[in-house]
Image: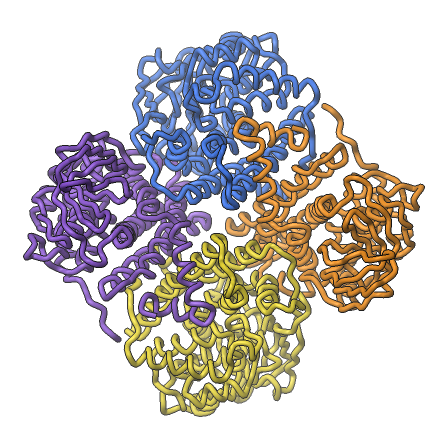
Chain colours: A orange, B yellow, C purple, D blue
């Protein structure tokens, strides 16, 4: 077969070990309560993982987009409470694409078209739902053919949270001096949206898989009527459906990653986000139902994954938006081109 | 199985109008943060106001402070409160089920002690059924009561006790006769009443909800003394009493109205704009389904007033209603197709965020839909539950 | 309670007995094979049932709309292969409303806006999906403020069938002389559409109930793994869902009937059709799944009901059309009027 | 459970292009009435043309007329045929499973007798598993074979035998050792090959499909003699062989492509018009889901080529794929929102009508999804099936 590029197993192993040690149930909860997790971030940054896929010459850690997506899959799998995507393949990517300086600290991203670059590179406007805005050193965005890096210290920050409990802040800038550069060809709002969607499907694939595994374990341990509840057909249906969505989500994410690594990949990213959004809705429902009341508590970890999935499914494009995009691609392909589109994707 | 169409009488319509006028006066839209159906705020003052109008303990006998109204009258009051998102939390459980249990199975002394206070909206009840190892298999409860002079010594732990920290009393299912090897688990159980806040040996602690909010509690008993006069009905018959109690909480508007205030608010926030086909199809589907389910649910109340015991019917409505609530929330999320936060400036989005977080509980609370299907399908086949 | 108008139990009893005797599995199948069922129709006509709700003075059988709907419920329940709705509450209603003669034979209806009334009352055009066009004596329709009754003998008939196997023919008229009268106020395309939808929900309520009962019986008789399959949780779910939809469908149909009997009832008819369409989709799926391969055969009667439901759910308005109508009513009611609309309906 | 993303090699893409060119030449759109996936027409001439190109019995050894191709190569040919609605019915079962069973469990004499004909597209097989009292509980089959000189005497009845009237041979599961009280039902079963049209004592009759079409048959045996040389593999091991056989028919494109030609035709009939949001959302959702499921299904074929036995994975794909087919048909019906007839002038509407009528069978044929869930969930839990 035409061998697909693989990820260095060391990356998977190291990230798994790191997150496995750091992202305990208690640590994830503490991060939610405090609104950040400086120790986890520090240990993560120590490995250079945040900057994987950014060129070493620009201060990144090198490696491929696939490596970065594998780390994000594990961020999802372990519910790591850190802005890994924002600092690396989203914000860091914007900055290094424009030749702007990559800071040492956290980078976040505004993708809501809310900020403008005025005269002399002064940035103004209010960006909402900014991930970890409160903890970031710089905020990156793209507008009007330019990439900008704004110091977050200059912003007024209103702290808010996503359904996941993770920070999604409102940042207001008023003529803040920023580093600005011309955006190279292909770096724009739209490419950021696709790349954002790609980051989310990677994390979603990991989180659904973890939820599915948790549910198999829980239903095998939990006894009612004298046997594990996994012996009941009604519960087995939930196990099967969650496993299917875990498989579908991860496969979609990884397939989109390969397509984006090799080329444009827009069809695959759009199709993957649509599949992951729907898989998240179905799987969170199945896993919660199988867990009963236990899954609704803070003390049991299911919610770390389910709430993140409820958040990620609406970020960088919900189900309707992406279905219209894929539908337009299908219409463009036409009847004779429909199946070739499904098998060949962006390359078709 | 038979559901018969019914309509409200002139008197019933007058009651509906009265409740609506009360709500419009007390809680005009925009003046309060609506709740999601029965997961409403606790507001003792509001419960008292409702009680003053005769809307708490409506179906209880006048002799004990009740109003001897019909199940349909209670349905009308309850559906309006829930759809409005009114803060009915404090009296909710006592009004829906505990008052009825005490009236049906208790003695006059117990009726006199509890019912007038319930009807005054001054006594909040919690329910002690589930335990760490007993959820769907409720008959396996192991909190036990050992005989003592004039009462029982209770040891064990109850969990998922909603709002025990804001309520006053607690109706608790426990084992008063030890289960023998191979014995019938449904025998030897009893229901007892326990004062939550003034009982030595009772400890109360929160079980935080998945986003940290405090709804659930764990209640543990260490050598708690419960006097005989707090045993409801016949010792050992707790399973049957409890089954009757659970029938009271099935099939009512609380099982299909939880997201109503959310949808109403969506309509409010989109008013003045031209609604496209997507919005029309959404509102049309939700409106029509509510109309259909409400007709079924109302007819169950009418059957109760006719002296029937519509347990299959109410199980069918609860299973359908709660599944529909979850489906509806998914449709709303897809319709909005945008990021959600509890911190949103939009009331609709705050409510929808709450719906997403609490939604999975709708098909679990009061018994999972899997257990409900088992109960209902036996009824459909004419088998004992 | 404000007593709802009731139907004479004799109507229910008589129609049940009549259809129970006539509409055997074999007779329904024979009707499908032959394309009509003259014996069943003759016996049905003998009772006067086709003309219930039409004024006796105009040649009808008297009785109320509710009586007619009860007969249609039993048409659905027994899968009676006859144009009961068309001859009575649809076609017959159009004719008697306009003071046109009610024929002795079958009346059918064109509701697809395809026929025009030309000079001197000559009718032209091609009407599709005309129920039992081949067997009808007259075809009734309304257009341009007029009600018309056309002799079907003058038409070119192309015989076709619905998914139910029942006749839905294409009839072409070329300047055929017709009886024409001014349509009274309230008799128009739109009122025919609502009335058609009402006829369909009545039949659907009956058919879903029958399917649900068949499924309970079959799964209690059918043994696998040493016990009736109804003992398995996976099958029980189908029983419960079908019973819910049987209840919902019949309740919706009967509630709409009462509302239409008392007044306008358009909100209730629209909401009922929407509910019945969706209930039909869910219940046919559940009942077929519970029956396994047996339900897919001609020899087992499930298909008499499921195929009729697949047909009726698309006649006189599908799910999307009616959801837009109800949605517009909700928008018109506004936020404060939404719940009053649900409780009060057309009267609100 | 592990599904690994994979891609087609250059050779595989060339095969795909070759198949597409063949279909465009043989069956240009508009020239034929497409089938719904594997429920395709039987066309011996078409099967022969495919065989001439080496596309029947692809995975069988060259020694017996096969082509020793990979599971992925077969996947590529099959998905193109199915999505095109090509008339693959005649060789379908023999190609998908019976050839593989004979190759794996049969002896050289049997391989020589059957495989070359299968690979030539000249031998159609039917399957004899279900019986009137044995469906989901397949091990309870009661068609029995009693020992006789040089063979067996068979009595019993098989049902749901698709296309036995157009096929030639029949692979049949029957009981060769009587089941003793309390014995293991899965022991004592055997698979035998029977000539459908030239076997004394075998009677064939239609079981008409719900709309009267003839797909299913009932095959009854009255003292039918089956010679020893027609027993496949080891007598008494039929259950295991049959389980292996069923794994061949799970998780392939036939479990998710049935309505593809319908959707393609909808797009064809709406081309040239401006598609609104409703249509875009429909096409988008269907296209994306097919992309996702196909990736999973293809990876199962790759696992088979790697020598693995992905039985959990293929069960998961089949359960998901067939459920999706049914959901998709419902979406199309709602999208069209208009009356349907098999007599329509529109090919799309004729196909959709056929989808509605046959759709319920998709989640039943080859084993209900309820049974599949049971198999898959045991695999997920690491339990024996």
Q: Is residue D12 left or right of residue C236?
A: right
Residue at horizontal 46 percent and vertical 56 percent from the top: B280
Residue D213, quarter of picture: top left
Vertical placement of C48 versus D55: above or below?
A: below
Comparing A85 with A192, the one in front is A192
Residue A41: x and y in percent read: 85, 57
Comparing C66 with A137, the one in front is A137
Vertical placement of A38 versus D367: above or below?
A: below
Comparing D278 with B37, the one in front is D278
How many labels were placed on the picture? 0
Residue C92 shows in this picture: yes
Quadrant housing the N terminus of chain B: bottom left
Residue B295: x and y in percent read: 35, 65
Residue at horizontal 62 percent and vertical 49 percent from the top: A277
Outermost residue, front direction? Answer: C119
Residue C60: x and y in percent read: 9, 53
Quadrant housing the C terminus of chain B: bottom left
Vertical placement of C221 versus D81: above or below?
A: below
Residue at horizontal 56 percent and vertical 62 percent from the top: B359
Residue D175 shows in this picture: no
Q: Is residue A60 left or right of residue B129?
A: right
Residue B334: x and y in percent read: 56, 54
Comparing A92 with D55, the one in front is A92
Q: Is residue A162 left or right of residue A45?
A: left
Q: Is residue D359 left or right of residue D201?
A: right
Residue at horizontal 35 percent and vertical 76 percent from the top: B71
Residue D208, quarter of picture: top left
Residue A224, quarter of picture: bottom right
Vertical placement of A26 versus A266: above or below?
A: below
């Amino acid at each position: 077969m035409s061998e697909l590029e693989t990820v260095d197993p060391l990356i998977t192993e190291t990230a798994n070990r790191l997150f496995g040690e750091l992202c305990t149930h208690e640590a994830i909860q503490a991060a939610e309560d405090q609104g950040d997790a400086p120790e986890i971030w520090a240990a993560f940054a120590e490995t250079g993982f945040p900057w994987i896929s950014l060129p070493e010459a620009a201060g990144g850690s090198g490696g491929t987009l696939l490596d970065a997506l594998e780390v994000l899959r594990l961020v999802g799998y372990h519910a790591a409470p850190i802005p890994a995507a924002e600092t690396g393949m989203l914000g860091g990517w914007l900055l290094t694409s424009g030749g702007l300086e990559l800071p040492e600290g956290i980078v976040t991203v505004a993708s809501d078209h809310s900020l403008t670059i005025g005269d002399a590179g002064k940035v103004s406007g209010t960006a909402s739902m900014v991930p970890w805005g409160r903890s970031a050193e710089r905020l990156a965005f793209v507008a009007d053919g330019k990439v900008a890096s704004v110091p977050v210290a200059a912003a007024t920050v209103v702290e808010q949270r996503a359904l996941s409990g993770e920070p999604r802040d409102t940042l207001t800038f008023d003529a803040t001096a920023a580093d600005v550069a011309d955006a190279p060809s292909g770096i724009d709002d739209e490419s950021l949206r696709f790349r954002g969607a790609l980051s989310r499907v990677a994390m979603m694939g990991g989180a659904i898989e973890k939820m599915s595994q948790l549910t198999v374990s829980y239903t095998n341990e939990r006894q009612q009527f004298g046997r594990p509840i996994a012996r009941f057909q009604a519960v087995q249906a939930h196990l099967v459906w969650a496993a299917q969505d875990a498989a579908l989500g991860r496969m979609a994410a990884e397939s989109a990653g390969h397509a984006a690594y090799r080329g444009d990949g827009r069809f695959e990213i759009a199709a993957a986000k649509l599949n992951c959004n729907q898989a998240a809705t179905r799987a969170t429902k199945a896993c919660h139902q199988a867990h009963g009341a236990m899954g609704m508590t803070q003390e049991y970890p299911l919610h770390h994954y389910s709430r993140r999935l409820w958040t990620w499914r609406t970020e960088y494009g919900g189900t309707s938006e992406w279905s219209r995009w894929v539908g337009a691609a299908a219409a463009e392909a036409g009847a004779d081109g429909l199946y070739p589109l499904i098998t060949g994707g962006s390359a078709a | 199985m038979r559901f018969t169409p019914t309509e409200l009488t002139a008197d019933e319509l007058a009651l509906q109008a009265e409740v609506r006028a009360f709500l419009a006066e007390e809680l005009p839209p925009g003046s309060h943060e609506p709740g999601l159906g029965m997961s409403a705020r606790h507001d003792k003052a509001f419960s008292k106001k409702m009680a003053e109008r005769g809307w708490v303990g409506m179906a209880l006998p006048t002799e004990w402070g009740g109003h001897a109204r019909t199940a349909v009258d209670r349905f009308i009051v309850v559906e309006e409160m829930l759809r409005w998102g009114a803060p009915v939390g404090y009296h909710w459980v006592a009004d829906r089920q505990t008052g009825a249990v005490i009236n049906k199975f208790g003695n006059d002394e117990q009726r006199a002690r509890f019912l007038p206070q319930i009807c005054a909206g001054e006594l909040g009840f919690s329910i002690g059924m589930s335990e760490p190892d007993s959820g769907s298999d409720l008959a396996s409860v192991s909190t036990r009561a050992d005989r003592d002079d004039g009462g029982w010594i209770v040891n064990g732990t109850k969990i998922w006790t909603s709002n025990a920290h804001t309520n006053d009393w607690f109706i608790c299912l426990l084992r008063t006769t030890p289960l023998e090897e191979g014995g019938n688990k449904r025998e030897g159980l009893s229901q007892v009443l326990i004062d939550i806040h003034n009982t030595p040996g009772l400890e109360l602690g929160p079980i935080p909800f998945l986003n940290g909010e405090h709804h659930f509690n764990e209640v543990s008993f260490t050598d708690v003394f419960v006097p005989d006069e707090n045993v409801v009905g016949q010792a050992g018959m707790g399973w049957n009493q409890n089954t009757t109690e659970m029938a009271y909480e099935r099939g009512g508007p609380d099982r299909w109205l939880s997201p109503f205030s959310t949808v109403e608010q969506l309509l409010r926030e989109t008013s003045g704009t031209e609604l496209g086909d997507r919005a029309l199809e959404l509102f049309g589907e939700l409106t029509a389904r509510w109309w259909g389910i409400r007709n079924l649910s109302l007819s169950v109340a009418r059957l109760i007033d006719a002296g029937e015991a519509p347990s299959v019917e109410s199980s069918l409505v609860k299973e359908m209603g709660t599944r529909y609530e979850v489906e509806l929330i998914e449709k709303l999320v897809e319709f909005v197709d945008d990021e959600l936060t509890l911190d949103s400036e939009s009331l609709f989005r705050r409510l929808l965020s709450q719906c997403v977080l609490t939604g999975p509980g709708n098909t679990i609370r009061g018994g999972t839909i899997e257990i409900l299907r088992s109960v209902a399908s036996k009824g459909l086949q004419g088998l004992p539950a």
